[in-house]
Image: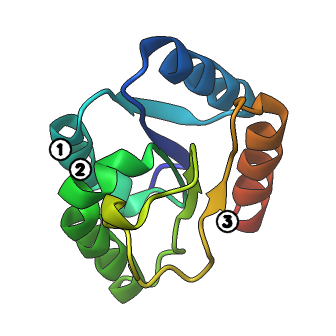
Amino acid sequence: MADALALVAEPDTAQRQLITGTLELVGYRVLASSTPLQLDVELHSTVAFTSRSLLLVLDPSFGAECARPLATLLRGRASAGIASPQVVLIRTPKESDGFGDLGLSTSPQVLGAPFDSVELERIARRCRVANGP
């Protein structure tokens, strides 16, 4: 079982790199996606299913296309007794983004604009502490 994994889904290259760098400093292995299709592949990966501490940092616009695989991942982790991931949305979602009720054990946190890397780092550290070493 991997220790800490972050899935980052953000279409903007500069923002994706900033998020990735912030999370790597906290000790996460980061898999970054720039499209919903890439995120879909990462959500189906074994490492996303088995990581002790999973952090999802998502652009809400990916929700409509990735809600089903995300819900499948959440159900699978719950069935296996693995902690639910912490979800961080990069901006406030629109109703049309399609996130709806995914069955998260905690509400997604929302980082507003401009992007707050200090807040992301705080959330990431808290997620790692809550889910083990």
Q: Mark 2 vs mark 3: which is more N-terminal?
A: 2
- How many numbered dots are placed on residues in this image? 3
Residue type, label 3: Asn
Q: Mark 1 vs mark 3: which is more N-terminal?
A: 1
- The residue located at (78%, 38%) in the rendering is 121
Q: Of helix, strand and loop, which one carries label 3?
A: loop
Q: What is the x, y in percent for residue 26?
A: 74, 33
Instruction: Determine which residue is flagged by label 1.
Output: 41
In the picture, measured across the screen, residue 2 lies left or right of residue 79, that is right
Instruction: Determine which residue is flagged by label 3.
Output: 131
Residue 21 against residue 102 in the figure, above or below: above
Residue type, label 2: Ser
Residue 63 against residue 71 in the figure, above or below: above
Residue 23 against residue 103 in the figure, above or below: above
Q: What's the distance in space between the residues labelled 2 and 3, CA to CA?
A: 19 Å
Q: What is the x, y in percent for residue 1?
A: 44, 56
**Is disc 2 surrounded by few (<14), some (14 to 19) or many (20+) residues within 10 Å?**
few
Q: What's the distance in space between the residues labelled 1 and 2, CA to CA?
A: 7 Å
Mark 1 or mark 3, whichever is nearer to me? 1
Residue type, label 1: Val
- The residue located at (36%, 82%) in the rendering is 80
Q: Of helix, strand and loop, which one carries label 1?
A: helix
Q: What is the x, y in percent for residue 74?
A: 36, 74
Instruction: Determine which residue is flagged by label 2.
Output: 45
